[in-house]
Image: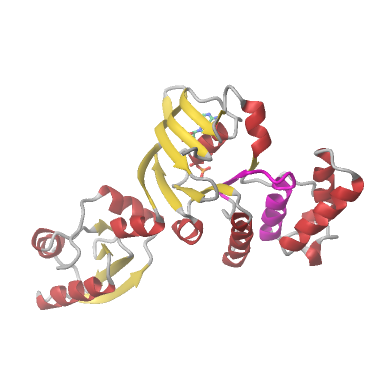
Amino acid sequence: MQYAIEVSKLRKSYKENQVVQGINLQIKKGELFALLGPNGAGKTTVINMLTTLLKPDGGTVLIQGLDVVKNSKDVRKKISLTGQFAALDEELSGLQNLILITKLYGYSNKKSSSIANELIHSFDLSEAKNRKVANYSGGMRRRLDIAASIVTQPEIIFLDEPTTGLDPQSRMQVWEVVRTLLKSGTTVLLTTQYLEEADQLADQIAVIDKGTIIAEGTPNQLKASIGEKTLSFRLAKSYEPKKIHEILVEKHALKIIEDENPLVFKIPVTKTRLANDIIDTLLNHAVPIEDFTLSDPSLDDVFLALTASKQEETI
Ligand SMILES: Nc1ncnc2c1ncn2[C@@H]1O[C@H](COP(=O)(O)OP(=O)(O)OP(=O)(O)O)[C@@H](O)[C@H]1O
């Protein structure tokens, strides 16, 4: 099977700092693949190598079978990249920006205008189409930037942190735009620092940390390995943390995620029932619990859980 994107043993260093350390990725046609990782994990460096902007030190990248180093010109015809900062003319309206960009690709005035208007409509920007981009909200800008990157109908789109810095409502609008792209059969590689974003959009997720892939799978597989939810509980008064470890880790093989606050404990759980069982167990041992919550794991939780030992399903 030919993958849309196939990355093998990819490496990049800046002086002695190895920021991408031999990563492998296989991305199928038409799927959304999310590269999830914190600031400085190496996501942008990977994207820049995959989009021909940066030469790898080692390894290979094939975009629909074409090598990014040997066939960079042909690769560029198949892809588009939307970075963290929009490359739009602030003084022009949204519509004018799109028409200008479309014309740059050699389309006639009439065709450019029709492509631009169609994009404005499908990205829900009709009301603001004649307004200067300088007066757009962050979410509108990001949508316009994605629209600008697909005027040539690329087969593969790279979105580098498309929602970083956006409010939740604008983030959801960008998600809708991404879903529209997927419906048209486009392959999307998206980088994000938000677990929820990867969970919402991705068919496959790879978690990257310090230039290495530390976990990979579907959102469900990943959640099953890190816990569907995180149970957090706080102790009423200073209590010997060793005892909590004895009860939960030694007796019941659970993993605990340490918190800065020594009275707070977090545990990844695969089932809500497990959270109930844990609270019951602690109360049976007369552990003074002040409060507890069950929430979606944060990216920090994911990293800590991925590096901790595996827990049992039930206790
Ligand atoms: N041109 C460069 N010269 C030297 N070091 C660099 C350069 N570009 C990136 N780095 C370093 O490489 C590491 C990876 O950076 P990269 O931008 O790829 O991470 P990222 O996961 O995209 O993070 P962010 O979310 O902040 O964009 C960081 O430690 C960064 O400081």
Q: Is 146 covered by the magenta stretch?
A: yes
Inspect this view and state whether residue 70 appears.
yes
Residue at x 61%, y 58% (from the top left corner)? 183
Residue 236 sits above or below residue 198 on the image: below
Q: Position of residue 147 (x, y in %)?
A: 71, 52
Magenta region: which residues? 138-161
Q: Nearer the viewer, residue 156 or 303?
A: 156
**What residue occupies the far front of the structure in this picture?**
1
Q: Position of residue 235 (x, y in %)?
A: 22, 71
Inspect this view and state whether residue 260 appears.
no
Residue at x 78%, y 54% (from the top left corner)? 134
Quarter containing the C terminus: bottom left
Whether residue 9 sits left or right of residue 277 in the image: it is right
Q: How many numbered tags mark residues here?
A: 0
Whether residue 229 sits left or right of residue 97 in the image: it is left
Q: Position of residue 191 (x, y in %)?
A: 52, 47
